Image (cartoon, rainbow, N blue to C red):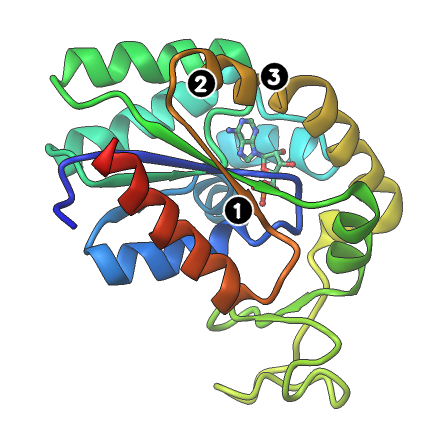
């Protein structure tokens, strides 16, 4: 598969977007732009921008579009060619239009949306039980090695919950997902750029589905 295309990977929190984006990036040699990760790094550095981002993200609210716009633009300027996976961006129609304009400006192709569908119930159970390694960012679920001991099986660090993975905040993040982000799916469907995936099976199976459906998409 050549990589002269761009992808958006989207789904509710806990649908495995980040993991699937990484698998795809490795397999097809693509670059990932993940505003969620960029924002978490900014929050760590206690700059004015970091503190502003924290105000929103710790409540589970979307960070203002203007901030996201600048961060994405900075990344795009460095990448300079197609073969990009946007992980969880855009999250509302305004961001979808921002992305469209950026891609036109850089003469990049418009993206195909990979939608990982999982139920609200599964999303809640996956996110509220997941832990992450603060060092290597590996994610752990109740069946993962090291979960019970609370130790990262890769680098031995103590695994933790993300602050915004607390039930009350997860509830707000999902409300935003179902009221704003989900509209994006229709937006791309109307343009014939949607690939719908059942995100509930094991990650290997989900990945297999994505590769198969991407191949079918390009045969159309
Ligand atoms: P995530 O890990 O993708 O669920 O993102 C965590 C938090 O980062 C979200 O709850 C938002 O506060 C913020 N965030 C991530 N991506 C975006 C985006 N595209 N637009 C606005 N806020 C975002």
Q: Nearer the viewer, residue 160 or 167?
A: 167
Q: Which residue is mark 2?
A: 188
| Residue 66 seen anywhere in this rendered image of the structure | no
| Residue 138 seen anywhere in this rendered image of the structure | yes
Nearer-N-terminus badge (3/1): 1
Name the mark nearer the viewer: 1 or 2: 2
Q: Which residue is mark 3?
A: 183
Total labels drawn: 3
Q: Nearer the viewer, residue 220 or 98?
A: 220
Q: Which residue is mark 1?
A: 40
What whole-number distance in Å separates the C-alpha atoms at marks 2 and 3? 9 Å
Residue 81 placed where, x, y %?
11, 34
Relative side of 33 to 200, left or right:
left
What whole-number distance in Å separates the C-alpha atoms at marks 1 and 2? 28 Å
Asked whether mark 1 and ligand 1 are closer than 8 Å, the reply comes as yes
Residue 174 placed where, x, y %?
76, 34
Give the structural element (helix, strand or loop) at label 3. Answer: helix
Which class describes the residues within 10 Å of circle 3: few (<14), some (14-19), or many (20+)? some
Give the structural element (helix, strand or loop) at label 1. Answer: helix
State which quadrant residue 112 falls in.
top left
Q: Are marks 1 and 2 in contact (CB under 8 Å)?
A: no
Relative side of 74 to 14, left or right:
left
Which class describes the residues within 10 Å of circle 1: few (<14), some (14-19), or many (20+)? some
Residue 153 placed where, x, y %?
55, 88
């Amino acid at each position: 598969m050549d990589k002269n295309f761009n992808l958006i990977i989207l789904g509710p929190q806990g649908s495995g977007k980040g993991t699937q984006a990484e698998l795809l990036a490795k397999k097809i040699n693509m670059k990932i732009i993940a505003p969620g990760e960029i924002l978490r790094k900014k929050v760590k550095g206690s700059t004015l921008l970091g503190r502003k981002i924290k105000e929103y993200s710790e409540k589970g609210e979307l960070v203002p579009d203007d901030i996201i716009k600048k961060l994405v633009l900075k990344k795009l300027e460095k990448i300079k060619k197609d073969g990009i996976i946007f992980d969880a961006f855009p999250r509302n129609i305004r961001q979808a239009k921002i992305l469209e304009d950026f891609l036109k400006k850089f003469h990049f192709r418009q993206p195909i949306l990979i939608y990982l569908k999982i139920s609200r119930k599964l999303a809640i159970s996956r996110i509220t039980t997941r832990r992450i390694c603060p060092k290597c960012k590996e994610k752990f679920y109740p069946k993962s090695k090291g979960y019970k001991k609370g130790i990262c099986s890769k680098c031995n660090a103590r695994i933790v919950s993300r602050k915004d993975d607390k039930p009350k905040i997860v509830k707000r993040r999902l409300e935003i997902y179902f009221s704003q982000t989900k509209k994006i799916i229709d937006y791309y469907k109307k343009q014939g750029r949607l690939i719908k995936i059942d995100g509930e099976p094991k990650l290997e199976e989900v990945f297999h589905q994505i590769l198969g459906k991407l191949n079918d998409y390009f045969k159309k």
